[in-house]
Amino acid sequence: MPDVMLRTEGLTKGFTLHLQGGLRLAVLAGIDLTVRAGECVALTGPSGVGKTTLLRSLYGTCRADGGRILIRHRGALLDLAAAEPRAIVAGHPILLLDEPTAALDAANRATVLALINEAKARGAAIVTILHDAAALAVADRAFPMTALQDAA
Ligand SMILES: Nc1ncnc2c1ncn2[C@@H]1O[C@H](COP(=O)(O)OP(=O)(O)O)[C@@H](O)[C@H]1O
Ligand SMILES: [Mg+2]
C-alpha cells in the first residue's frame, strides 16, 4: 500500500526490573499498527498500558524486543530494527506526539491541535496520545490498548 507511512508488525517489548529481582514486565505483545499519510491515530487506554512505550519504540529511544517497525523512507518501507532510527525519522512527515496538549492552557491547546490538523492536511502520518475528548477529536481513529497484566 503506497500511502502507508508507518507500520508495526508483531511489536513486542518488556522491561526487566533489576531492582525487583530481575522480574520481567511484559508491556507490548504483538502490536500491529498501520498509519497512512494524512492520518492521525490516537493511542488510548489507561495509564500504564504501554502507550508511551509504544511511541518510544517508534522514536527509537526504546528498543523493541521483537517484531518489525517499518517506516516509509525514500519511497520504500524500511525496517527500523536494521537502521539508525533517529537519522531516518528526522525530517520525515511522521509525527509522534506523547500528550502534546497536557498542561497547556486553552489557547495553546487550540494552537497545538491546529498544528496537528495542518500536519494532517500536509499528508503527515501522526501517532499521538491524547486524553481529553475534545483533543481526541483531532484523531481519525483510536488504537485502544489493554494491559497485559496488572502492575506487580
Ligand atoms: N524504563 C522502564 N523500565 C521499567 N518499566 C517501565 C519503563 N517504562 C515504562 N515501564 C512500565 O511499563 C508499563 C507501561 O508504561 P507506559 O508505556 O509509560 O504506559 P502509558 O504511557 O500507557 O501510561 C508500566 O507498567 C510502566 O511502569
Ligand atoms: Mg504515557
Image: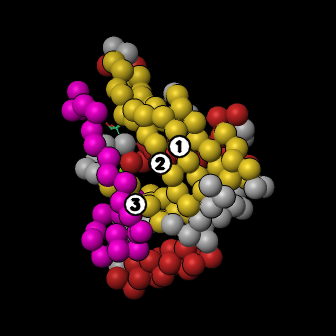
Direction top: furthest residue: 21
**Dot 1: what SS?**
strand
Q: Are marks 2 and 1 in contact (CB under 8 Å)?
A: yes
Three-letter amino acid code of the residue under disc 1? Thr
| Residue 38 in view in this figure | yes
Q: Quadrant of the N terminus?
A: bottom right
Confirm if mark 3 falls within 8 A of ligand 1.
no
Mark 3, other Cα within 10 Å: few <14 / some 14–19 / many ≥20: many
Is residue 27 rendered magenta in the image? Answer: no
Residue 69 against residue 114 in the figure, above or below: above
Q: Report which residue position mark 1 lands on.
A: 8
Direction right: furthest residue: 74
Q: Quadrant of the C terminus?
A: top left
Q: Report which residue position mark 2 lands on.
A: 33
Taking the spot 52% from the left edge, 28% from the top edge, the residue there is: 66
Residue 96, labelled with which disc?
A: none
Describe residue 106's horizontal placement relative to residue 108 as left or right. left
Which of these two is toward me, 104 or 150?
150
Which of these two is toward me, 1 or 32?
1
Three-letter amino acid code of the residue under disc 3? Ala
- Residue 7 is situated, as x and y percent measured from the top left of the image, at 56, 48
Residue 68 against residue 25 in the figure, above or below: below
Taking the spot 32% from the left edge, 52% from the top edge, the residue there is: 144
Residue 113 against residue 145 in the figure, above or below: below
Kindly report the distance in space between the C-alpha atoms of the residues bearing marks 2 and 3: 11 Å
Kindly report the distance in space between the C-alpha atoms of the residues bearing marks 2 and 1: 5 Å
Looking at the rendering, the stretch of residues picked out in magenta corresponds to: 129-152
Q: Report which residue position mark 3 lands on.
A: 42
- Residue 100 is situated, as x and y percent measured from the top left of the image, at 44, 66
- Residue 37 in which image quadrant: bottom right
- Residue 16 is situated, as x and y percent measured from the top left of the image, at 41, 22
